[in-house]
Image (cartoon, helix red, strand yellow):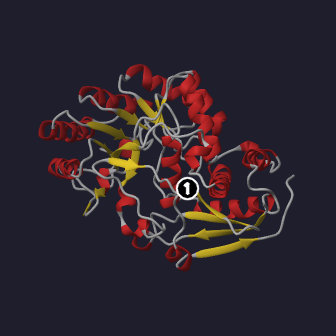
Amino acid sequence: MKVTKVDVYLLDAGAQRAERRPIVCRVHTDEGIYGDGEAGVAYGSGSNAAFGMIKDLAPLIVGRDPMNVEPIWESLLKTTFWGQGGGTIVFSGISALDIALMDIKGKALDVPCYQLLGGKYRDELRCYASQLQFGWTSKTGPYGTTKDYVMITEHALSEGYDAIKIDFTMYDRNGMAVPKHRVEGILDYDFINMVDERMAAIRDSCGYNFDIIVENHCRTDAWGAIAIGELCDKYKCFAYEEVTTMLNPEMHRVVREKVRTPIAAGERIYSRWGYMNFFKDHSVQLIQPDVCSCGGLSEAKKICDLAQVFDATVQAHVAGAPISTAAALHLEAAIPNFSIHEHHFRSTQEAITALGKYDYQPVNGKYHIPDLPGLGQEISDFAVKTALAHEVIDTPGEGE
């Protein structure tokens, strides 16, 4: 079997276009089997760069045997010069192609991708309702009052979830975005009190028989992160996510030494090499690799295996299109140190679900693992027809 061409698409997420611009690819073979992959930059700045990265990497797999996933991964890393420099865009491009190749391999062998990763430990995954400050299913934010935060929490719990994630620092009491200067340096009393009021209201109204993950989106520096971390301890939170910038692992260690709540991070850490410093100083207890940006399924499995050596558990980061969800489900099914699955608010919205052939959703807070060959998910015909950009790469190329 040989790779014959690669389609690269910039997808249109409809009304959410400004916030979600998923980049996906489809790798074709001479035996008619194809595989789909996704780059993990559907939001923020970088989607156009990821589109170009896949275009640049694709010639290196045209003409090759797609079953040789590991040798191809090594060549994408080591014969492209910038591959060994790493970073979001390089690893997102590698990830998209790696996922597509794993999808092909699973289809060719007529097995789900979790079998390629060693087999599944579990048939279903516990999920949490993620990013409730934006809303949940039929209810949309942003939210400002403590009553709003209680309402949206109760709404998620009523659907069978027993864990949620909220960024309590993103919006002020009027539901307006908190300006950047407000969360830098030493946090003022009113700001800390606002976060305290929201956490207290949720615990007072909903109790302690469910888990809260506190999202921070790297918005504060370490000293502000410690202040919020003390509230995480006070209200017995499950995890405290992206406490400060990923660029200096030492500051994560500083926060971890002051905060008892487990520290979570990973969506902006790439490859085994990127995770190693966080593991060595035990600054992250719950890793969150994004399969679509950390290096793909084959690399994500290695990261999770390495995490087990350092007693770190895993929750794959999921905030893209349906391919990213499917890839995460297969990874989390196949590792012993799985913790919980992220089900993002955007993944409940039609603008995102329409981009996949199948609409997989949790039932009573649990996700069942797809058993179809490969990923068990494909880019939908609708996604292809409405794509904002499309390129075809069918000529082999060489690395450096």
Q: Where residue 9 sits: x, y (%)?
A: 61, 70
Check the image and report above or below for 385 versus 243: below
Check the image and report above or below for 379 versus 152: below
In what element is the residue under mark 1? loop
Depth check: give the residue in front, 116 or 69: 116
Under mark 1, the amino acid is: Leu
Depth check: give the residue in front, 400 or 123: 123
Give the residue displayed 59% in from the left and 22% down from the top: 280
Q: Where residue 175 sits: x, y (%)?
A: 25, 56
Check the image and report above or below for 389 versus 347: below
Identity of the residue furthest to the front in this view? 110
Give the residue displayed 55% in from the left and 45% down from the top: 114
Res 326 seen here: yes
Q: Is residue 125 left or right of residue 32?
A: left
The image quarter in which residue 206 lies? top left
Image label count? 1
Q: Is residue 38 left or right of residue 222?
A: right
Instruction: Determine which residue is flagged by label 1.
Output: 375
Depth check: give the residue in front, 146 or 96: 96
Q: In this view, does 54 lie to the left or right of 394?
A: left
